[in-house]
């Protein structure tokens, strides 16, 4: 199967692009956008880890190493499309337009973190593994039935492919030919379980064969490969060509979450040879004269400020309101729930 | 006096005489006509019209896009319905039997019931899950479960269960129009047991409201769905012993109609709760709790439960022994009255 | 995929076998055994339908048309192997050694129908679709861990492949390389849903590709093809070669169950061209001189008597005992359950 | 007087001072040593030793065949465990968090709990499902559910929940040795909250038996797991008001220790039930029902429930508002005493 699904890439580890045609498709706007967002989410991610270490937010699952997968895929979408992230895909949602303050809030245990900006179709991060996959099929199906050209991009990990919902979701997508892009980030671990124990098959792409889905396996650390392959899938979906499964082979540089210790289960050498996607893009930019020091400095400065401001705003966000515990369970809370609220607020001395 | 019959007589619209399953069909049809976003999903609901014929003729009339035969995949049905609901549709998903809802339990528990809460109301899941439930029709195993308590213990979803054709249609329409998810339980045993006048077109029966089916003074019988006939029979039988039963049909299992229950129990001072599900963990305990909260000082005897035993619903040769019977209700009534 | 998984057959509709080598593998014992069991379960099946019509048993799911799949596969097993049937596979379990009286009892709503003869590893018929698949993987895994050579044969329908448990079960089998044979009877309908609506993919065999499982698609009405292909899979499993997925393409002649009306959903012409597997075997036996009138008459007579006797025994079986409701929930019933039993039996006047 | 401490002192074997999670690890180790057929399955339980380190070191000691890192597939874990259990093994399956048991709900409901009944005892499923439960550790959503009532309403499976290291090990061993399936709930909040002397080697705490932790006269507090410290704190606080609480630790949630409850409530005439799960459908209602059945005439006030609210367990910023607190228990105690 590895022969049937070779890892597609357009840019090598040193940032070289051998294919002339691909090179022509890459313009300055794209390069800058890619770098800007990858840098942005990198700063966010590192800040989140440090906040967690200081006890200023809760447990946090870093995505460092997966920036090309997340940015490259989500940049292939249009504004009216849908995004279904997991807990590790805030890099994608931030790039798609999620609010950074709220993203920090999410990791501080606040439901506010699940509320997307008006008009942005971003689902709350899926925590129960693979459960978002059928949702993504459902929203895409709805778009198809409404006759729009909007598509749905659904993220999930290598581990998620072992769950029943992965299977049921892909089958529905296949049967109803929904415009869904199943974007798998194969970072080769599900917490401590390496992909060799997760599955006996060698690729995730081959799982698409079960549903007659177009599947492709790509280098998830090659931002251009990710972008162009996702774009292809998006175009196909928009034009009624149905769903696609993309396996982006990548690597999480750090721990599963800030509560995890990867040295317990990952051999020391593993991953050492992986070139960080941001470094790779930097090589490319230098190789092909897109590296403008002034611009780099400027955005680094801007983004650092943005992240700091977001942290500040997160920490000055209004305190969580116990009423919220009761107010969003139903559109119209039943009497007994209102009573529970009432008596609890009274106890808190604010009846 | 049959309070309900009186109310029905007031109905002036034109009506049809329907069984419950026909009334459900009519309710679905009404909403498919009313609202373009209504969409039915399920196994065998299309061409076949459902294994109980609840969706008979609907695919023919509304097309394959609105009455969808899905793959055999309950989690897929409910999970894709979440996406449809969030994106402008009103999915009415059929679980072929309530015992086959369990593969979808995760989706219902972690998303259907929680999405509104998670997003502080930004997204919601206005969907209906229809589930034929209960024993007594000689079906194979797992086809006869009565699993309401697994959903009343799940904040964010409402649970309703009609006992008559009229209520079935009215509650179903109310459920489809509800802004939140509703589990709609259908007593299979009552599907064709009774015919009654059912108004044509759209009307609703309010979710959250039960009904007093019979006035009485000595003891309150609380039941719903397929247990209503059992309660009625028992009440009739004890009449001869000069025991007067009040009968409540709950109709909605979450949220409970607390006033109805409190008022009745405070009058009679005694209550018998009748349900098919197992005693332990059953909704009967919630009702006792409710009565404990509201009517402690009014009670003249311990509240009695007549329920399915704490055993899996058996293969059908023994199902009549599993199910509450008028005889068992009778025994409990006497126990309460002669406490 | 249909090219990658052509329907394998060794015997054509007229009962001719073109491949000389295969022909040599077929001896009189096998032919007689095959015919005997197919005939036997055919009589059982028809009797069950007629009992249901007379209200003497409950709803019944006929397997007529699928006899070659059931008999051919189960004959490939050894006595210590495991069988996991669905509600439609009593043809297989009867052939494997299940008791006929108890099989009738099962369809009369009696738990006694789930109790296999001592030493026969037959699971109760799975009613919740696909749930038996992980069980079959678990028992096979246990055999592997015990170091035996026993294998597990697991039946399931085309519809079952849409459930999450199918996927999770096959993945476990693949990861732990359990000696499990996944025997799919693709009768092209799941109640009323035709396979084209169940899945967009053209074959069930291709679903094995997701798990790197050896998969094969066979003519499920060709008893010899079923037998030899299952045998191959069994041998592989016994020898540590792990699981196999077999798609046996077949046809249910009748209704889904006695409560079902297939004219509502099956086009009248559909299935008309399918040669009934027993007829096909009869052609073969006549073509190759295995058709002994006397023997045929004799077994027909014997089997009819066996079935009649089983019906008789079923109907004279001791009445169901309400105690059984309570006695098999736990090894040692908790006090509260014993009380429920006690008071109910008292009410029945037998305390 | 702390009844429990006294009993502990009688223990003569050599002991270790352990936290609850260490005691669980020790219990698993004990049974892996004792019985070759014991096999652990779960996500990240092997090399990683479990996300809470409950299985730390066990794969190293017993090998990959006995401490198995499975795919991410709860239904697969439980479903294959059924096969293993039927065929001679004693699977102890870990659900990484109780909120991730829902994908396996179908397997547990339709097979784990029913196989013995289906086959009249021919097959059985002696397995243990371990599930860390409860809020209060600032975990992400779905990681904090307390879902016991979804299993006490499932005939054929027992449910236990220790509150101390000693009980954790003893109940776990009893669960592994039980001929029937047992759901073993582990209060995450108590994993490292307390250390105590835990005997080395094998011992059991009887399933089906609770324990009186504190004698009292005015009101009975009934709790388990992570709510025991909450009950104790409240009891301590009302001591100043001269209210004397009796505290019961149920330990087993099905089957309930009815005598323990009845005896205590008949003495005090008042009961407060404390649990994390939602009020509606919660086990509290079963306890009220139980008391209604056994002790109706002894009650001096309505039974109080202090529980999680009827809302999904919230994101952690609000979890302390969701959880029962000593303050809420206090309020209920006063309400009961001054009824
Ligand atoms: C149903 C379910 N089971 C278990 C977990 C606990 N859990 C959280 S993340 C994780 C691993 C997920 O791995 P993968 O899908 O590869 O995504 P990654 O974390 O690598 O991005 C597990 C087991 C969960 N969240 N949901
Ligand atoms: C989980 C579950 N959902 C629904 C059903 C109802 N049901 C019984 S048989 C069946 C169709 C099964 O089709 P297939 O797997 O092809 O097997 P066949 O009946 O054709 O042998 C359905 C939907 C069920 N038994 N279990
Ligand atoms: Mg991963
Ligand atoms: Mg089929």
Image (tube, coloured by chain):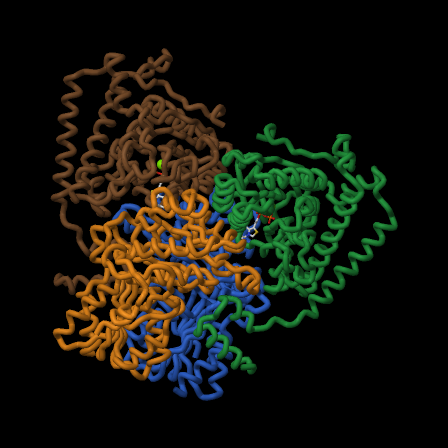
Chain colours: A brown, B blue, C green, D orange
Q: How many callouts does the rendering have?
A: 0
Please, which residue is most extreme toward the right here? C294
In the rendered image, residue D180, in percent from the top left (x then y), is placed at: 47, 62
Judging depth in this view, the residue of B284 and D145 nearest the camera is: D145
Judging depth in this view, the residue of C271 and B199 nearest the camera is: C271
Judging depth in this view, the residue of A169 and D329 nearest the camera is: D329
The residue that appears at 55% across and 80% down in the rendered structure is C348
Examine the image and state in which quarter residue D211 appears.
bottom left
Horizontal side, residue C314 vs residue A235: left or right: right
Horizontal side, residue A277 vs residue D92: left or right: left
In the rendered image, residue A166, in percent from the top left (x then y), is placed at: 43, 40
In the rendered image, residue B85, in percent from the top left (x then y), is placed at: 37, 46
Judging depth in this view, the residue of A271 and D4 nearest the camera is: D4
- Residue A309 vs A345, above or below: the answer is above
Give the quarter of the figure containing the C terminus of chain B: bottom left
Give the quarter of the figure containing the N terminus of chain B: bottom left
Q: Is residue D101 visible?
A: yes
In the rendered image, residue D125, in percent from the top left (x then y), is placed at: 49, 58
- Residue B302 vs B106, above or below: the answer is below
The residue that appears at 63% across and 39% down in the rendered structure is C235
Examine the image and state in which quarter residue C120 appears.
bottom right
Examine the image and state in which quarter residue A118 appears.
top left
Q: Is residue D149 visible?
A: no
Horizontal side, residue C47 vs residue D256: left or right: right
């Amino acid at each position: 199967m590895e022969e049937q699904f070779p890892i597609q890439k357009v840019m090598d580890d040193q940032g070289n692009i051998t294919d002339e045609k691909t090179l022509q498709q890459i313009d300055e706007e794209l390069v800058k956008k890619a770098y800007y967002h990858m840098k942005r989410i990198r700063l966010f991610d590192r800040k989140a880890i440090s906040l967690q270490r200081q006890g200023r937010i809760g447990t946090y699952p870093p995505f460092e190493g997966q920036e090309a997968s997340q940015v490259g895929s989500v940049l292939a979408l249009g504004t009216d499309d849908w995004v279904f992230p997991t807990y590790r895909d805030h890099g994608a949602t931030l790039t798609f337009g999620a609010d950074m303050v709220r993203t920090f809030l999410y990791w501080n245990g606040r439901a506010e973190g699940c509320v997307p900006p008006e008009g942005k179709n971003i689902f709350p991060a899926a925590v129960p593994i693979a459960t978002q996959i059928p949702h993504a099929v459902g929203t895409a199906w709805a778009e198809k039935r409404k006759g729009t050209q909007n598509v749905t991009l659904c993220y999930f990990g290598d581990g998620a492919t072992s769950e029943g919902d992965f299977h049921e979701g892909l089958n529905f997508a296949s049967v109803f030919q929904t415009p869904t892009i199943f974007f798998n980030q194969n970072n080769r671990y599900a917490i401590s379980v390496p992909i060799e124990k997760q599955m006996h098959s060698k690729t995730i792409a081959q799982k698409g064969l079960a549903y007659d889905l177009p599947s492709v396996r790509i280098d998830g650390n090659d931002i251009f490969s990710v972008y162009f392959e996702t774009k292809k899938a998006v175009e196909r979906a928009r034009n009624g060509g149905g769903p696609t499964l993309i396996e982006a082979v990548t690597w999480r540089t750090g721990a599963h979450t800030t509560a995890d210790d990867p040295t317990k289960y990952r051999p020391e050498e593993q991953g050492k040879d992986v070139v960080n996607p941001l470094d790779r893009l930097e090589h490319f930019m230098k190789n092909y004269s897109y590296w403008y020091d002034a611009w780099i400095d400027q955005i680094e400065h801007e983004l650092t400020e943005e992240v700091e401001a977001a942290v500040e705003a997160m920490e000055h966000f209004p305190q969580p309101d116990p009423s919220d515990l009761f107010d969003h369970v139903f559109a119209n809370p039943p009497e007994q729930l209102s009573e529970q609220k009432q008596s609890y607020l009274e106890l808190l001395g604010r009846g | 006096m049959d309070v309900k019959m009186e109310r029905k007589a007031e109905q002036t619209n034109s009506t049809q005489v329907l069984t419950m399953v026909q009334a459900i069909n009519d309710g679905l049809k009404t909403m498919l006509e009313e609202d373009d976003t209504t969409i039915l999903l399920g196994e065998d609901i299309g061409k076949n019209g459902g294994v109980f014929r609840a969706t008979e003729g609907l695919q023919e009339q509304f097309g394959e896009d609105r009455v969808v035969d899905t793959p055999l995949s309950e989690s897929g049905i409910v999970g894709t319905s979440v996406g449809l609901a969030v994106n402008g549709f009103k999915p009415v998903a059929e679980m072929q039997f309530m015992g086959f809802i369990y593969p979808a339990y995760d989706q219902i528990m972690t998303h259907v019931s929680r999405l509104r809460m998670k997003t502080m109301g930004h997204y919601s899941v206005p969907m209906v899950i229809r589930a034929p439930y209960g024993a007594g029709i000689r079906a194979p195993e797992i086809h006869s479960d009565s699993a309401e308590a697994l959903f009343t213990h799940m904040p964010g979803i409402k649970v309703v269960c009609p006992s008559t054709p009229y209520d079935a249609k009215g509650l179903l329409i109310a459920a489809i129009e509800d802004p939140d998810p509703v589990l709609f339980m259908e007593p299979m045993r009552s599907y064709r047991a009774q015919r009654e006048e059912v108004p044509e077109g759209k009307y609703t029966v309010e979710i959250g409201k039960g009904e007093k089916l019979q006035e009485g003074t000595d003891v309150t019988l609380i039941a719903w769905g397929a247990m209503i006939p059992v309660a009625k029979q028992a009440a009739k039988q004890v009449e001869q012993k000069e025991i007067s039963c009040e009968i409540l049909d709950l109709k909605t299992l979450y949220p409970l109609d607390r006033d109805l229950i409190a008022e009745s129990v405070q009058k009679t001072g005694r209550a018998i709760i009748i349900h098919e599900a197992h005693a332990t963990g059953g909704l009967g305990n919630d009702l006792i709790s409710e009565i404990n909260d509201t009517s402690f000082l009014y009670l003249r005897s311990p509240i009695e439960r007549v329920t399915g035993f704490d055993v899996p619903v058996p293969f059908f040769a023994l199902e009549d022994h599993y199910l509450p019977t008028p005889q068992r209700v009778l025994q409990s009534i006497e126990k309460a009255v002669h406490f």
